[in-house]
Image (cartoon, grey):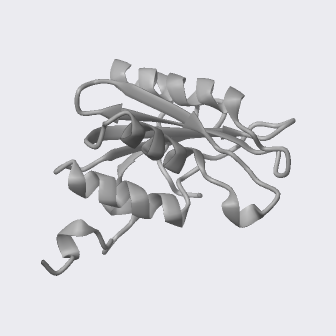
C-alpha cells in the first residue's frame, strides 16, 4: 500500500472513532481457531445504532463468515437495513496488522447492496491494529462498477 495517504485515529471525528472502537472491541469475540486472524466490524445505522460483530471460522473453510457480513446479518435480524458507515479492524494472534484490513470481495458486494438499499454512499473505515494507518473511503470506490438491486431488471 505504498503511496497511500493514511489517517491516524486522532484525525477521525468522534462518530468515526466510536465506530472503530466498537469494531476493535468486537475482535475479542472472533472465533478464529484456524487462521488466528481476528476481525471486528461495526455498522452505523441511519438511526445512530451501532451493530458490531466478528468473524466466525469453520473447519469447512467455505462456511466461514467475515466480520462485515456477520454485522450485516446481525443488523438485518434486528430490523436495521439502512446504514451510514462501517468500520473494520483486525489483529493476528501474536502480532497486529501493519496495514489497514479492507473488506474482502464478498463483503464488498454485500456492503454495496446495503449501501444501495440505504440510498446513500456507505462510508468504509478500515484500520491497522495500532490505528495509526486508517483509510476512510466509500463502498463505491472499493467496488467500482458494482452490481446491486438498482441494476436488476424490474
The N terminus lies in which quarter of the figure? bottom right
Can residue 135 be seen here? no
Count of all numbered marks drawn on residues in the image: 0
Query: At which x and y percent is residue 21?
Result: 52, 22
Of residues 86 and 7, the one nearer the viewer is 86
Q: Residue at x 31, y 53 (%)?
A: 114
Q: Residue at x 51, y 43 (%)?
A: 126
**As drawn, is 110 to the left or to the right of 56?**
left
Residue 48 in the image: above or below residue 64: above
**As drawn, is 31 to the left or to the right of 109?**
right
**As drawn, is 131 to the left or to the right of 12?**
right
Residue sitting at the far left? 154
Residue sitting at the far bottom? 153
Query: At which x and y percent is residue 19?
Result: 44, 27
Q: Residue at x 50, y 31 (%)?
A: 52
Of residues 139 and 41, the one nearer the viewer is 41
Rendering quarter of residue 93: top right
The C terminus lies in which quarter of the figure? bottom left
Residue 44 in the image: above or below residue 136: above
Of residues 126 and 69, the one nearer the viewer is 69
Of residues 127 and 56, the one nearer the viewer is 56
Q: Residue at x 44, y 60 (%)?
A: 108
Query: At which x and y percent is residue 32?
Result: 78, 44
Residue 29 in the image: above or below residue 54: above
Can residue 74 be seen here? yes
Query: At which x and y percent is residue 16?
Result: 39, 27
Amino acid at each position: 500500500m505504498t503511496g497511500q495517504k493514511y489517517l491516524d485515529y486522532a484525525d477521525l471525528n468522534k462518530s468515526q472513532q466510536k465506530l472503530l472502537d466498537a469494531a476493535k472491541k468486537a475482535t475479542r469475540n472472533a472465533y478464529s481457531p484456524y487462521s488466528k486472524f481476528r476481525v471486528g466490524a461495526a455498522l452505523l445505522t441511519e438511526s445512530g445504532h451501532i451493530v458490531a460483530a466478528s468473524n466466525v471460522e469453520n473447519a469447512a473453510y467455505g462456511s466461514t463468515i467475515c466480520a462485515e457480513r456477520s454485522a450485516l446479518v446481525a443488523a438485518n435480524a434486528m430490523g436495521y437495513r439502512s446504514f451510514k458507515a462501517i468500520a473494520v479492524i483486525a489483529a493476528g494472534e501474536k502480532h497486529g496488522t501493519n496495514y489497514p484490513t479492507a473488506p474482502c470481495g464478498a463483503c464488498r458486494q454485500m456492503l454495496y447492496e446495503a449501501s444501495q438499499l440505504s440510498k446513500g454512499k456507505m462510508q468504509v473505515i478500515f484500520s491497522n491494529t495500532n490505528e495509526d494507518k486508517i483509510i476512510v473511503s466509500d463502498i463505491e470506490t472499493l467496488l467500482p462498477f458494482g452490481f446491486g438491486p438498482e441494476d436488476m431488471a424490474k
